[in-house]
Image (cartoon, grey):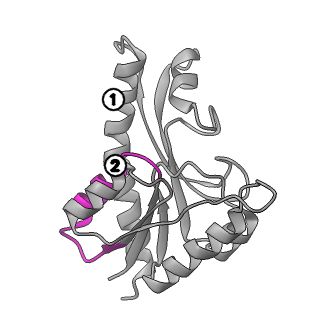
Amino acid sequence: MAGYAVLASGSGSNFEALVKTLAAGPHRCCVLIGDRAGAGCFERAERLGVPAVLVSYAKDADGKLDRLSAERTLTHTLEEYRAELVVLAGFMRVLSPFFVHRWKGRLINIHPSLLPRHPGAHAIRDSWESTDLELGVSVHWVDEGVDTGKLIEQASFSRSGIQSLAEAEEQIHRLEHQLYPRVVRRLLDELTPG
């Protein structure tokens, strides 16, 4: 059995899909870590019986975001809960080299486009506004860039018949909820000896 941690900033729909889909297997979500008080992911964690921790990104005396301090707290929490895989699921922070190197080979993200096309925070909108014939999602290893890590797996669908951005977004989220649990399960199986 391997434990995974989920880092989220928003509603937590990917988190819930992971927990529910993987519940029947040997792997468990050991902790949800969120960075926004009141985010929907905390309600989902409570309902699903998963421990949840808020890690705030505070500003230092100069008014700059103290990312390193927050990431030390993240690392301590992940170690405390013995996370073997760190799963970003709508975590809207760019992680520092310190954090990325600490969790190298055990830190993944899901992105709502077919990378390398449309990296960044507005991927669904950018994909929709493009001339791409296929829309989709990518699971990748996290590196020091923004959505630049080595691809693990992608899934796509034809944009033919999709009438609106909202419809495209709904289909992308549905695909995320199918792909991410499958990839996470496979990676956790690889981490588990025997």
Eyeballing the image, is 155 above or below 191? above
Q: Is disc 1 placed on a helix, strand or loop?
A: helix
Residue under the image location 32 percent in, 72 percent down? 51
Q: Considering depth in this image, is 117 or 81 the residue closer to the camera?
A: 81
Cα–Cα span, label 1 and label 2: 18 Å
User: In the figure, is residue 6 to the left or right of 142?
Assistant: left
Answer whether residue 65 is visible to the viewer in this image.
yes
Q: What is the three-letter code of the residue carrying label 2?
A: Gly
Q: Which residue is mark 1?
A: 170
Residue 29 belongs to magenta span:
yes
Residue under the image location 55 percent in, 62 percent down? 56
User: In the figure, is residue 148 to the left or right of 155?
Assistant: right
Question: x, y (%) of residue 34?
Answer: 45, 59
Quadrant hosting residue 184: bottom left
Residue sticking out furthest to the bottom? 194
Number of residues whose C-alpha sits closer than 10 Å to that of mark 1, classed few (under 14), some (14–19) or many (20 or more) = few
Q: Considering depth in this image, is 2 or 122 the residue closer to the camera?
A: 122
Q: Is disc 2 placed on a helix, strand or loop?
A: helix
Q: Considering depth in this image, is 86 or 40 the residue closer to the camera?
A: 40
Question: x, y (%) of residue 151?
Answer: 58, 52
Question: x, y (%) of residue 132?
Answer: 55, 20
Q: What is the three-letter code of the residue carrying label 1?
A: Glu
Eyeballing the image, is 129 above or below 19? above
Residue under the image location 34 percent in, 12 percent down? 161
Question: x, y (%) of residue 136?
Answer: 46, 34
Residue sticking out furthest to the front? 61
Eyeballing the image, is 45 above or below 170? below
Q: Which residues are magenta?
A: 9-30
Q: Which residue is mark 2?
A: 40
